[in-house]
Image (cartoon, rainbow, N blue to C red):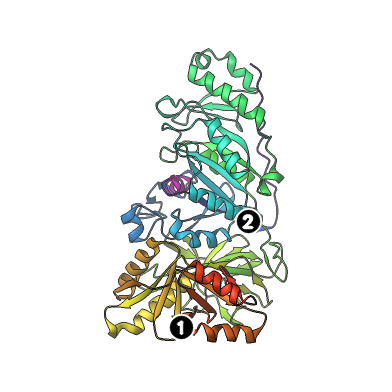
Amino acid sequence: MSMSTQVAQSPSRALSSEPYRTRRTFAIISHPDAGKTTLTERLLAAAGAIQSAGAVRGKAGTRSTRSDWMEMEQQRGISITSSVMTFDYDGLTLNLLDTPGHSDFSEDTYRTLTAVDAAIMVIDAAKGIESQTLKLFEVCRLRDIPIITFINKVDREGLSPLDLIDEIQGKLALDLTPVLWPIGQGVDFHGYLDLLEKRVVSPQGKPIADYDAIEDLLDNDTLIEDPVFMTALETLEMATTMLPPFDLETFHAGHLSPVLFGSALKGIGVAELLRTLGEWGPEPRPQPAIPAPIDPNDKKVTGFVFKVQANMDANHRDRIAFVRLCSGTFTRGMRLKNVRSGKDMAVSNPMFFFGNDRELAEQAVAGDIVGIPNHGTLSVGDTLTEGATINVTGIPNFAPEIIRRVRLTDHMKTKQMAKALSDLSEEGVTQVFRRMVGADWIVGVVGALQLEVLSSRVAKEYGVPITFESLNYEVARWVESEDPKELDRFITAQKMNMAEDRTGAPVFLAQNAWWADRAKQDFPKIAFLTTKERH
């Protein structure tokens, strides 16, 4: 049997005086139930950030530290909002963003992906590529985000490694390079081959054998007497024959993905995943912006708000804007300009986050995620600079797929409801529209579960019970035109079907797709937009 593995050895980390080069900012993406949040906590434990999954390392030592910190998330066992964990590992500072897997919260995930330099794609070994995985991968591809693939639940029965690789390559058009290769699956899972460290590892994580060339393992009588091990060697040979060798540049360009087989629940392959991210994961990359991309090496501070979270601390009614720093060295107390409003703000209490736990951030550099407390002055899409007029691009709103009228059961609480809807629309939980004729409050969401979250949070955080009722609208489109008079003519003709979004931009509401198409035909100079940049 002639075999050779094509994975390059780990490159030594380049030493640099630039602190941003030690940052690794990444998201974990997957279909619901693929094991994303479990993997998040196992990564934190493997890095020493927590003592064990679910328990904070600290003086108390017993506090819960789930990345799913919202009460509704813990009740339902799903991720509803992206959470940020900043921690250290092997001389690096890692900023981990755990994203919602459920498609109803895809807008939050999309915006989060604008703030990362890499992604870990979690795939269920029994289910392969699922619909939401495919959608999120396409978002990564739009931004050429490098992806590390973690095939989870290998300790359960599932598709064969070769079938999984074929499916990933076929559906995603993504080249793969194996880093960890399983020895069997399910009840026959006997460990894995670590192709970087050149060792065989037991299911409990203990090294069984080392090798220089993989052929050396054929001299190990204990291993070759195991038919499961021999099958694993044969499938590995087939995989390495048909797959390209690892190339760092191709990986960083988003065209090649290292693939690891493991089990998040049992911690199998998690330490190696962390190692792969640390060694191969990209440092902060240039950020798309107008008038030019922002280079992380620029000395002036720039950053952008990719997420706003209200009421993380219900006792203090706080409101946190999560800012991805793109360049420069930010220090506590620095004054930054909000390009959208043109106003300067002093950032006196910036924070690093660990789920919903926080600590004061005295200094941060490109790649870091900083939370800035504010009272409505910052919104998703805002760019912060030391004075330059720069707008980060690629942070859109999406046209809602479900449109509902908000009904207030207690009309004495109209002001509270208005504040709640305004806060949560700036946060990105929902989009809020006001009719041009009439006083209706209208919300637009991507999925029905968003409506549940919206009503639950408005009731819990603002003390305002609301319900929703159907409207005679299925389609919402932002309308623009290079001819202002033509736009005015359209708005006048469609006045009863017009609304404004939170920024005052006009939105056309159509009964169905047919009416939307009819409007396009009748007004060819009007652009009907399904996405709109947030600035």
Q: Name the quadrant of the N terminus.
A: top right
Front in this rendered view, residue 100 or 373: 100
Quick check: 326 above or below 123? below
What's the residue type where badge 2 is placed?
Leu
In this figure, which residue is indicated by the disc labeled 1?
496
Binning the other alpha carbons within 10 Å of mark 1 as few (below 14), some (14 to 19) or many (20 upward) gives some
Binning the other alpha carbons within 10 Å of mark 2 as few (below 14), some (14 to 19) or many (20 upward) gives few
In this figure, which residue is indicated by the disc labeled 2?
142
Relative placement, left or right, of 408 versus 203 is left
Q: Secondary structure at mark 2?
A: helix
Quick check: 448 above or below 168? below
Q: What stretch of residues is rendered in magenta?
A: 34-43
Of the two numbered discs 2 and 1 in the rendering, the one whose residue sits closer to the viewer: 1
Q: Quadrant of residue 443?
A: bottom left
Residue occupying the point 53% across, 84% down? 493
What's the residue type where badge 1 is placed?
Met
Q: Which mark is residue 47?
A: none
Residue 153 percent coordinates (x, y):
44, 37
Is residue 380 visible to the viewer in this orientation of the structure? no
Q: Main secondary structure of the magenta part?
A: helix
* Magenta residue check for 233: no
